[in-house]
Amino acid sequence: MTDLKISNTIKYIGVDDTDIDLFESQYIVPDGISYNSYVIFDEKIAILDTVDRRKAAEWWANLQEVLGGKQPDYLIVQHMEPDHAGLIAEVAERFPNLQIVATPKAITMLPLFFDKVDLAPRCIAVEEGDTLSLGGRTLQFFHAPMVHWPEVMVTYDAKERVLFSADGFGKFGALAHEDEWACEARRYYFNICGKYGAQVQALLKKAATLDIQTICPLHGPVLKENLGYYIGLYDTWSRYAPEVEGIFVAYASIHGNTAVAAQQLAEILRQKGAKKVAVADLSRDDMAEAVEDAFKYSHMVVCAASYDASVFPPMHDFLHHLKIKSYQNRRVGIVENGSWAPCAARVMHDMLSQMKNIDIVEPKVTIRGAVKAEDVKALEALAEAVMKKD
């Protein structure tokens, strides 16, 4: 079991999953993922969430070790997604006197995942602000719909000033892999919760009314130091505000000519004084990281080849991801390539126009085949337009 100290009465029983290749069957996680779960000991004992069935044996061993033969009274279900709720039915079976605490919406979802057992008689439905006494402490529950499922709630322990934040403040990477928090937390946030900025803002407003000293998420490390840093980043991300003044150049190239144009544009931007320039090859780089960088930087330029009277699919896929994650409030330049019938710019413009508050920069650049001297001049003009101060 991971040696993670929260307090004398709050124990960590989560597990690392370093065997998984894709989280939610789409996000690469080279450093794995943690499924976090906790136990609070008081006059009554509460388990907070279970884990993915992939790691059932390890989780049960951790639970039995910390319980030491004691019987838990409650299972608090903050989120019904299977990576956290996979063992609810088994817990109910092994502890017949245990009650399940969850939002009304979560309770209605239980039969969707556990259709062979009626858990409803074991459930306590909690509304916004409801409390549960464990004896020496009282837990308070706050609904967090669409962060990032509709049934989500978070739990606050006022005695120890701990917020159990469900998927909020989560991060890719197993706990055994120590790295800087923001990078993988950012990639996690924008790809998992990015669509729901308004709902995250609502949760942050609730959290601001609480005295929080520790944040215990369902993925990633427990946060104890410098909480203002983490909360500040979540505020920036959920307002769709740029985190970094810089330019993200994303390209989709078939035979390499568009890649050359993108790299030349990046160098032009640097020469003209851009504070930060990042470049991604959408055909080869991690799509989730490209989405992360699009949200991270204040400006973006998309460069793509024309393809089948449209745009090269990796770019179409990228822009589709941005749309469904509510990309907004950015200045964007466009570069297309097309040997005989350039059409990528039109498609990219149409897709970007469907997003909120996107300032599409003119002039668009059209390249036909290899990059030529006149194309470099056009790229320089685009760089100046992208970097132009309002």
Image (cartoon, grey):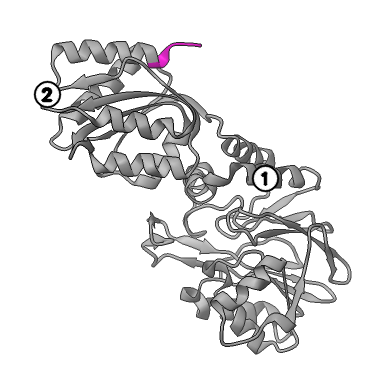
Q: Position of residue 257 (x, y in %)?
A: 15, 29
Residue at the (32%, 32%) spot, across then down: 348
Give the x, y percent position of residue 311.
24, 36
* N-term mark: 1 or 2: 1
| Above-or-below relation of 114 to 265 | below
Q: In the structure shown, which secondary structural element does the residue marked by tag 2 occupy?
A: loop
Q: Any mark on residue 370, and which?
A: 2
Q: Is residue 273 visible?
A: no
Q: Dot 1: what SS? A: loop
Which portion, as a residue range, is magenta? 386-390
Identity of the residue drawn at 76% across and 49% down: 212
Residue 99: percent from left, percent from top: 75, 80
Locate residue 305, reporting x and y percent: 20, 33
> Which of the two marks, 1 or 2, is nearer to us in this view?
2
Of the residues shown, which amino acid type is indicated by label 1? Glu
Q: Is residue 14 visible?
A: yes
Name the quarter where the N terminus is drawn: bottom right
Write down the residue under mark 1: 225
Q: Nearer the viewer, residue 312 or 239?
A: 312
Residue type highlighted by circle 2: Ala
The quarter holding residue 148 reads bottom right
Q: Residues within 10 Å of mark 1 (few under 14, many from 20)?
A: few
The secondary structure that most of the magenta stretch takes on is loop
Q: Is residue 294 above or below residue 25?
A: above
Q: CA distance from mark 1 to mark 2?
A: 52 Å
Q: Could you say which is closer to the camera, residue 180 or residue 189?
A: 189
